[in-house]
Image (tube, rainbow, N blue to C red):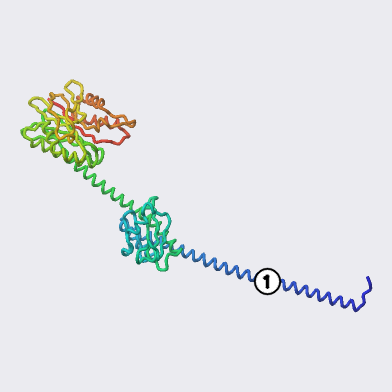
Amino acid sequence: MYPVSGQESLQIMEITTVTTAVANLDRSGALLCDHATAEACMRSLRLQSARDIDELAGQLVETQDQLLAMYDLSSTTRSHLGIGETLQHLAREATRLVYAQGAVLCVGATIVQYPTDLIDERVVLDYLRPDRQRESDLLLNAPHPALPEGITNLCLLPIQIRGDMRGALALVNRDGGFTSPNLKLARAIAEQAGTHIEHALLYQETLDQARLQTEMAVARRVQLQLLPQSWPSVPTLDIYAESRPALEVGGDFYDFVDVPDRSLMLMLGDVAGKGVSAAMIMGMVHVAMRSAARFLPDATPASVLGRTNNDLYDDMTLLDSFTTAFIAQYEPERGLMCYANAGHAPVIYRPPGGRAQLLEADGIPLGVLPVSLSQDNTLAFPPGALLVVTTDGFSEARDLGGAMFGYERLLQIVDAFADQPAQAIARGLYAAVDGFATGQDQEDDQTLIVIKGIA
């Protein structure tokens, strides 16, 4: 080191002061720069937040509009119950809420347009064909080859009904086209429409079912009223008859023809099948058989069956049906029961003091051949004799295991109740079959006639 003069010391001090000042100035500039950057960042954040808030507000307004629209749709649709008026209302409300020119609602083969027929129904049905059904929306804008003349845009939305795509909502000609917000609203309307349509269909089905049940109840009452409501009064006979259809109406019938100067004739028939079709055929056979028994000269069981078969063969062939029938004629002077059997079973005869036995049919059911093969047969019918004619709803009744009641049980019940009055015998048969088939629905009509000889 060497000594520094006073002049040099002064120069060093000046340089140091300048350097320090420059350094301080640099720090101040940096601070000012950092502050400006922060200010710019804050302004950017505020602008971004404002945009986010505006976007969120727009979404909330859109959501609120959709909720209000859905509430409006639900409120106004609640009073519409029929499927037709429900579809018409939904089409009108969809048009109004989406600001479209019109709407088309299609459910199955039912198409409703509002306000007028804007589009050919075949266009909508074409997009609903099984091979073209879509699970997503279909948006078409003109020019497009699938759009009919006068249609500038069309939005087709599938409607789910009971889990299947069974319908569609088509919105037609919206000014400005279909944008994201109104497409969302349209989808929401389609979903809501599916719910309302399901409710309308359920209501219609419930209404139809109630109407059908009412009509069937009336038919059952009429059918039972057409059967004899009282039994003929014969001093030497105890008579009881009853019919219990498996459904509201059935194919079984019984009747008594008791006219002056003629022997009492009793008849029972069983049309193949059950339900409405069997009931209609039963009415036809019943009238024909009763007329033959009343108006044939010197009518016998076999002649009545023959005349009935001749009258109804063509009709029963056309209907692919047949009827088993049993007719008996009581001759009190001779103590005999004359009978003819057209393929009917079971028929049970019990002589006084004897055992119950089945009477075999000697003919075939009515309607099978152009002629009847049934012949007249006779039974001794003194006091104590018993004739029980039932339909196969008794012998073919099944228990929970699928076993049938059978003929043997019927014979045992008849033997067990043989000393009882005719009504008690019938009640015993019904009770035995009901107990055997406990837990099972009645599968077939159950009809019987019980005739007992008395002193």
User: Is 390 above or below relative to 3?
Assistant: above
Instruction: Work out whether residue 444 can be spotted.
Output: yes
* Disc 1 secondary structure class: helix
Q: Residue at x 30, y 52 (%)?
A: 204
Residue 117 lies left or right of residue 342; in this view the side is: right
Q: Residue at x 26, y 35 (%)?
A: 444
**Which quarter of the figure is the C terminus placed in?**
top left
Q: Position of residue 84 (x, y in %)?
A: 30, 57
**Which quarter of the figure is the N terminus placed in?**
bottom right
Q: Position of residue 375 (x, y in %)?
A: 13, 28
- Name the residue that disc number 1 marks: 35
Amino acid bearing label 1? His
User: Is 104 above or below relative to 393?
Assistant: below
User: Is 75 above or below relative to 221?
Assistant: below
Q: Position of residue 385 (x, y in %)?
A: 15, 24
Which of 311/244 is in front? Answer: 311
Q: Residue at x 20, y 21 (%)?
A: 355
Neighbours of disc 1 within 10 Å: few (<14), some (14-19), many (20+): few
Which of 133/397 is in front? Answer: 133
Dividing the picture into quarters, in which one does residue 308 lie? top left
Instruction: Work out whether residue 98 can be spotted.
Output: no
